[in-house]
Image (cartoon, grey):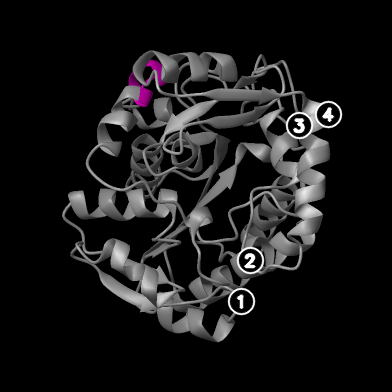
Amino acid sequence: MVTGATGFIGYAVAHALVRRGLRPRLMVRRPERGRLLSHLEADFVYGNLLRPESLARAVEGVDTIFHLAARATFESYDRLRPTIVDGSAELMKAATRAGVKRFVFASSLLVYGSTDSEIDASTPTRPQIGYGRAKVEAEESLRREASPDMELAILRLPHVYGARSFLFDQLKKGFLLFPGSGENVYSHLHVDDAADLLVEVAARGWTGTSPVADDDPSTWNGFFSVLDEYYPAMRLLQLPSSLAIAGATVLEAALAWRKRPTLYTSDTVRGWLLNLPVRRGLVWQDLGLEPRYSSIDTGIPASLDEAVSFRWLHTTADRSNG
């Protein structure tokens, strides 16, 4: 079963499972968004992390869970906790009662603090924004609630990009707003590689907790340079970090009354400004695999190729309430 199947990474995981000849169960919270996946040979089930009673039915008869559902924005910790922390704990409780054998959780590199050193599995967590704190606590709750014989894999994903990502959604509008100098180093991973790695971890019984990325961490300026090379229509507007944080703080306060998730927050800006280089080959080498797109040099043009054939979509751009 895949939670968050209509989201950016969950969508790719669902497709990766179907490509392997499987018929996944896809958990959907907003039925109208199931249309995104209607072309797949899959089963659909309603489930809501905020409604624990819906989860028992969703996981019944399942042997593996890929957990990607949550409020996927960098809002305040108080807004994120119900789905990321409490919802994950309730899902694991239901999975344990149902006898689920494997549980794969998509965590985040934002559990770490900004660092110039390469990040590996031994790097201590030190979240600097609410999203990272919520992910750390979700990891802890999953370990606590998992049955002793369950295989639990936690992958701390970096910046995952692709044709349906938020960044590419902004690109289609003709310009990108970005805070800071762009010289901080970040780790990246194409969404297809993220999905394939999540699926392979389950298929091969890998367990543990580790950051993952492609083979070549890059500065944001390097990322935008490759984008500009292949997509000259891109217009990049870089704002001083202090101005970006101040502006986002004002917008966040102005939009606080809305229920809809937003990326216009001060923590979004702080997240982009972190320095997060991941050591090459983590988890990939354990499985004897390599990413299909080893760096942004091949991943970005592949994303642009895919973007030609369909409308760019992303859950954070959703116009429905909830």
Check disc 2 and report its element: helix, strand or loop.
helix
Residue 54: x %, y % from top left: 50, 83
Residue 165: x %, y % from top left: 45, 42
Identify which residue is drawn at 50% across, 64% down. 319
Residue 154: x %, y % from top left: 54, 47
Identify which residue is drawn at 76% across, 62% down. 256
Residue 51, image quadrant: bottom right
For disc 4, the marked residue is 242
Alpha carbon separation for disc pair 2 and 4: 30 Å
Q: Can the viewer see residue 128?
A: no
Q: How many marks?
A: 4
Alpha carbon separation for disc pair 3 and 1: 29 Å
Amino acid type for the residue under numbered disc 4:
Ser
Circle 3 residues within 10 Å: few <14, some 14–19, many ≥20:
some
Check disc 3 and report its element: helix, strand or loop.
loop
The answer to whether mark 2 and mark 1 are in CB contact below 8 A is yes
For disc 1, the marked residue is 50
Mark on residue 83?
A: 2
Q: Earlier in the sequence, mark 3 or mark 4?
A: 3
Q: Can the viewer see residue 16?
A: yes
Check disc 4 and report its element: helix, strand or loop.
helix
Identify whether 202 is placed above or below 246: below
For disc 3, the marked residue is 113
